[in-house]
């Protein structure tokens, strides 16, 4: 049964934690996952010797639920989040939570907290955080004896203040996001912990975040803070970096498809050299949290490189953003399988 939407200031909602009533919890013990259950407890009770706390054996996902004009609630490509989490688990020797159960768990959490799914037209959405952690009594450096898979949710607004407006970035030459052949392609907490200091230094210097270069040569753009980079060349090609240490963003691959199939652009993954920014007429950061954040300018070794504008969004970036949100909120027909409706009965 559909529940009445809670009364929040949806238009001014930030990207922060608001406790919602229900979350999903499943335990892996003795070689298998239990049936899982819903709980109102937003505290995880784990051993002080859990590997997630000492050795970083954990991974997570980020995804959103959207309310359509007709009042339906839908998820955007949850199967891709399930696949990416499975790959992260394999990298850290953790048991994979079955992909079909992953999607059903997310649907259950959204349905149970449906009154917290923001109203259509508010610009806000319900953010879901699935995560899988190693727990149990394990003090040695080896895989945990037990694991927890959980999904919670919280309503969120824009990740960057101002929504779709250009922001500036610096280049973090003294810091790497990930090591060559490391865990850069897995969505694990250690990657983000390593980014906290360079992020704060960039913010203190007046930037939205910093850009990370490839750790081997420091010549190619890899990621933009906690998001993927993309550029629109002056001959209208959508380009995004390719590297084994970049997190495979679901938003990025969706934009690659939309650029080619919906906007008729050439689209490719290839090297994006930091000293060749002139090839791009527009640039942006993309990811689940922000969707798209247009890049107004990048500062690198004394050069302040402005793309389309520091105050206005480029036309192709705008079209990509509008198309993506149109699909997510049900106003535009997306490719088959991209949208999964949440049963509310």
Image (spheres, grey):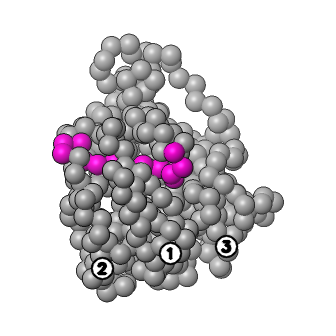
Magenta span? 205-217
Residue 207 forms part of the magenta stretch: yes
Residue 143 position, x and y percent, is 31, 24
> Alpha-carbon distance for marks 1 and 2?
15 Å
* The label number, if any, that marks residue 120 in the structure image: 3
Residue 48 visible in the current orientation: yes
Which residue is disc 2 drawn over? 234
Q: Main secondary structure of the magenta part?
A: loop
Label 1 sits on a secondary structure element that is loop
Of 28 and 92, nearer the camera is 92
Label 3 sits on a secondary structure element that is loop
Q: Residue furthest bottom?
A: 264
Q: Quadrant of residue 271?
A: bottom left
Q: Residue at x 56, y 74 (%)?
A: 329
Crowd around label 1: few <14 · some 14–19 · many ≥20 (10 Å) = many
Residue 237 forms part of the magenta stretch: no
Q: Residue furthest front?
A: 302
Q: Quick one: label 3 or label 1, which is nearer the N terminus?
A: 3
Left or right of 20? Residue 91 is left
Which residue is disc 1 drawn over? 313
Residue 191 position, x and y percent, is 37, 38
> Alpha-carbon distance for marks 3 and 1?
23 Å
Q: Residue at x 50, y 75 (%)?
A: 313
Q: Residue furthest right?
A: 7
Left or right of 261? Residue 159 is right
Residue 307 position, x and y percent, is 40, 70
């Amino acid at each position: 049964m559909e529940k009445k939407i809670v009364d929040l200031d949806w238009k001014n909602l930030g990207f922060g934690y608001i406790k919602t009533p229900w979350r999903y919890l499943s335990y892996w013990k003795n070689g298998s996952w239990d049936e899982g259950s819903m709980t109102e407890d937003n505290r995880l009770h784990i051993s002080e010797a859990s590997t997630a706390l000492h050795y970083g054996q954990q991974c997570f996902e980020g995804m959103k639920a959207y309310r359509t004009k007709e009042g339906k609630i839908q998820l955007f490509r949850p199967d891709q989040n399930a696949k990416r989490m499975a790959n992260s688990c394999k990298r850290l020797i953790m048991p994979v939570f079955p992909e079909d159960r992953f999607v059903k768990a997310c649907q259950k959490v959204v349905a149970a907290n449906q009154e917290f799914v923001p109203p259509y037209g508010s610009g806000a959405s319900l953010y879901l955080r699935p995560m899988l952690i190693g727990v149990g009594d394990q003090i040695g450096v080896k895989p945990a004896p037990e694991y927890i898979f959980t999904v919670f949710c919280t309503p969120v607004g824009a990740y960057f203040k101002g929504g779709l407006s250009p922001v500036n970035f610096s280049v973090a030459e003294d810091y790497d996001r990930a090591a060559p052949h490391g865990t850069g392609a897995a969505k694990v907490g250690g990657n983000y912990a390593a980014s906290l200091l360079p992020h704060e230094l960039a913010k203190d210097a007046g930037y939205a975040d910093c850009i990370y270069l490839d750790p081997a040569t420091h010549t190619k753009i890899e990621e933009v803070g906690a998001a993927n980079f993309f550029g629109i060349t002056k001959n209208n090609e959508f380009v995004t970096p390719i590297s084994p240490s970049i997190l495979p963003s679901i938003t990025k691959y969706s934009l690659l498809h939309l650029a080619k199939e919906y906007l008729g652009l050439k689209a490719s993954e290839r090297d994006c050299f930091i000293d060749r920014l002139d090839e791009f007429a527009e640039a942006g950061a993309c990811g689940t949290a922000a969707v798209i954040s247009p890049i107004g300018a990048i500062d690198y070794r004394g050069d302040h490189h402005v793309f389309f504008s520091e105050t206005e969004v480029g036309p192709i970036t705008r079209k990509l953003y509008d198309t993506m949100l149109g699909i997510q909120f049900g106003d535009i027909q997306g490719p088959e399988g991209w949208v999964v409706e949440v049963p509310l009965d």
